[in-house]
Amino acid sequence: MPQDIKTLGILFAVGLIAGTINVIAGGGSMLSLPVLIFLGLPPTVANGTNRVAILLQNTGATWSFHKRGLISWAWLKLAAPPALLGVVLGTWGALRVGDLAFQRILAVMLVLAAAWTVWHPMPPPAEGDARPPSGMRRWLLIGIFFSVGVYGGFVQAGLGFIMLAVTSAFGLDLIRGNAVKVTLVLIFTPVALAMFAYGGMVDWRLGFALAAGNFLGALAGVRLQVLKGQTWVRHVVTATIVVFALRLLFTG
């Protein structure tokens, strides 16, 4: 029992950090996923369990954006259908890959995500509330959101960076881009979570311990962002991700 309490406490603390990071810079799953693995969960089960925290965290974030009228429903109508199709495919792949193979893939993704935070910081805000593009650019964006769904269904870690880069590149300001990000993740995460649960790949007890920390961490992140700023947090996150990635590469 003491060991169980210690494990739940560790996950709650990691959730606090991950939730804070997600509010400030994104990429909280790049910390929570390795920790779940190091606490003894098989990598594929850790991948499914992490979705419990993602679901609860984005529920609160979406509600907060909705109250402030910042959600672009035109973007979500465009993004949700292809992303939902993609997440089914990505989750199907995650359920069928072996634990060691997934661990290696995750390690590589963590290294790439860490490199992204160093060499490609968040783009400057666009002006105004841009509408989704039309013509060929619209079809390109549909294809991108399908790929976003595949990636989110498979691993999720680092997805926030990708989505904000995409929405900014297509003219959406960072605040509304973040609102689209959390709402789209909220829309497709129940699908991924249901598939993982059906495959027996979710530890609900550990998932809810992590989720409780994520929820409170998201609230704390707003204040920490004001006090410390994004640059300081990015340095800490990047260093931690590299350590976890190296551990994953040379473990198992």
Image: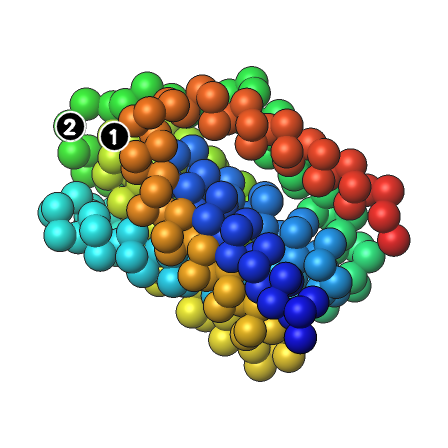
Instruction: Identify which residue, 133 or 155, lies in the foreground.
Output: 155
- Outermost residue to the front: 2
Tell me residue 60's x, y (percent): 29, 57
Viewed as shown, does residue 89 lie left or right of 76? right
| Picture residue at 47% right of the left edge, 27% below the top | 233
SS category of the residue bearing label 2: loop
SS category of the residue bearing label 1: loop
Viewed as shown, does residue 249 lie left or right of 34? right
Viewed as shown, does residue 222 lie left or right of 246? left
Residue 81, image quadrant:
bottom left
Residue type indicated by callout 1: Asp
Q: Are marks 1 and 2 in contact (CB under 8 Å)?
A: yes
Instruction: Identify which residue, 216 or 250, lies in the foreground.
Output: 216
Which residue is label 2 attached to? 128
Q: Residues within 10 Å of mark 1 (few under 14, many from 20)?
A: many
Tell me residue 4's x, y (percent): 65, 70
Instruction: Identify which residue, 35 or 58, lies in the foreground.
Output: 35
Instruction: Identify which residue, 73 or 21, lies in the foreground.
Output: 21
N-terminal of the pair, mark 1 or mark 2, is: 2
Viewed as shown, does residue 232 lie left or right of 246? left
| Picture residue at 16% right of the left edge, 34% below the top | 129
Q: Residues within 10 Å of mark 2 (few under 14, many from 20)?
A: few
The answer to whether any part of residue 84 appears in the image is no
Task: Count the numbered circles shown.
Answer: 2
Q: Check the image and report above or below for 136 versus 40.
A: above
Q: Check the image and report above or below for 188 versus 127.
A: below
Tell me residue 12's x, y (percent): 51, 57
Residue type indicated by callout 2: Gly
Which residue is label 1 attached to? 173
| Picture residue at 30% right of the left edge, 27% below the top | 226
